[in-house]
Amino acid sequence: MLRLAAALALFTPVASLAKPSKADLALQAQLLTHIKELASDAYEGREPGTEGEAKTLRYIGKQWFDLGLESGTNDPGHSWFAPVTLVAREPDGSRVAFSRKGRRVHIAPVAVQAFTSGKRSLIENAPVLFVGSGKTMPNRAELAGRVALLLDGGLDGSDRQSALLRAGASAVLTVLDGERSLDNVTARRGRSGYALASDDLGGDLEAFISREGLDGVLAGTGQNVASLQTMAQAADFAAKPVDLAVSLEASTRETRINTHNLIGKLPGKRPESGAVLLLSHWDHFGQCAEPPAEHLICNGAIDNASGIGVLTEAARRLRGVQQLDRDVYFLATTGEELGLLGAHAFAENPPIPLKQIVAAFNIDTVAISPAGSPFAVIGKGMTPLDAGIAAVAKAQKKKLVEGDAANAYVRRQDGWALLKHDVPTVLVSTAWSDLARMERFMDKDYHRPTDVVKPGIELGGAADDVNFLVALTRHFADAKKVPGAAK
């Protein structure tokens, strides 16, 4: 445990439904202290790879060390802080050239744009295959070596584009024949995309062309966008070659970001029986507005300084109970806002085999609901945990929300990354029991500079979350009540 001191020194990169007890009021005060600290301007919005990250991890690490946790990395070379390397990619170059029967067909560069998911992708003089709106998928033999020409129809065609690429198309050229413009697409695709440095670089090529641009390219062929639309609407539509060839080239610019997960642990009496994991993301967006805006920082008070506060106070209370059978791990993840990347990194390089985690509980955006609110389960029906959660709720006299409406958010939180690795993970919180209230927060403050500590911030439900998470952890860490962890 003493190693944390050295690591911290060196680390640089609504009215309540029920009257709260004195203990709950004290807990709310502790939560408010964490949220005010982590959401202050001094932390610069907790952006990965910045001094704001260093301050954040120093604060959380000191809290965990002082309350008696041990390092949970199980890696002597990286005590407490598990390195995560991210890659930010931005479009850096695009070249598109059309030809017909070997002769170049002119198109203005402003009418077409190519993008790649890799560092550089190139195809030369590939024949074009019109696939309509992508409702009918050509076979692999038809797509192989060809560029699929896809009608956009004003919809985000990312799923259709991906399906065509998986089916064997060399690239996809989408015709912006609806409301979306090339400016809209390039503005969205021009933002940085993030991935783990360990991920394989893709080489997918996607291009977008304006309606006017394609009409110009097809001039003299007897076809235009309108005729292609009519063709695609036919009941017996089948993919058809177009008298065009296209060369596409796209490249990206990469920036590496060195960031960290923080992992703590409470050792159990029977670690061979498995472990319970509690996790919450510490990161946010840093500076997210530009002058002349008065406030430039996305402080992330509710999303997710509140979650880190709940995680820390749950750890404090679990440290104070009799030693549990199973180890309990506490994970503060990086890169959640960039695509759940810290959780993916944890799953790819876990401190223990993932099959030994009998239950994981994510904590995200929790300072929303008043005390006494029911609990919702994001991930309900997707893991073997439901019966145990219901049993604990009954014993604790807590109400669970019926139905699974909160599952609409399952892909938008770190639990999804762990579920994809077959770790039984749920998010159990009062905050998600009233989705209308949550959506009001999302419409007003979510991912905006206005997510700050405001007068009257609601912490009653967050305090309830702490107490219920402690009860859930004690239940699932009991090897007699919940047997069966894989060795």
Image (cartoon, rainbow, N blue to C red):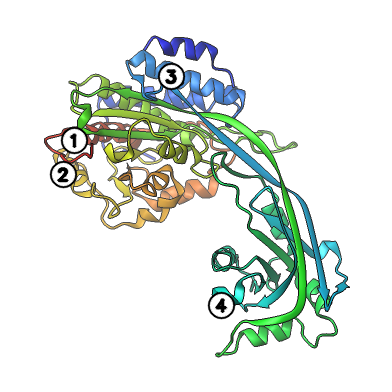
Residue 264 vs residue 43, the one in the foreground: 264
User: Looking at the picture, which amino acid does disc 3 mark?
Assistant: Ser
Residue denoted by label 3: 79
Q: Which mark is residue 402?
A: none
Residue 183 visible to the viewer: no
Q: CA distance from mark 1 to mark 3?
A: 28 Å
- 121 versus 23 height, above or below: below
Q: Are marks 1 and 2 in contact (CB under 8 Å)?
A: yes
Q: Nearer the viewer, mark 1 or mark 2?
A: 1
**In the image, residue 96 lies at what x, y percent?**
79, 63
Residue denoted by label 4: 138
Q: Which mark is residue 475?
A: 1
Point out the image quarter for the N terminus. top left
Residue 463 vs residue 339, the one in the foreground: 339
Residue denoted by label 2: 391
The image quadrant of residue 166 is bottom right
Q: CA distance from mark 1 to mark 2?
A: 9 Å
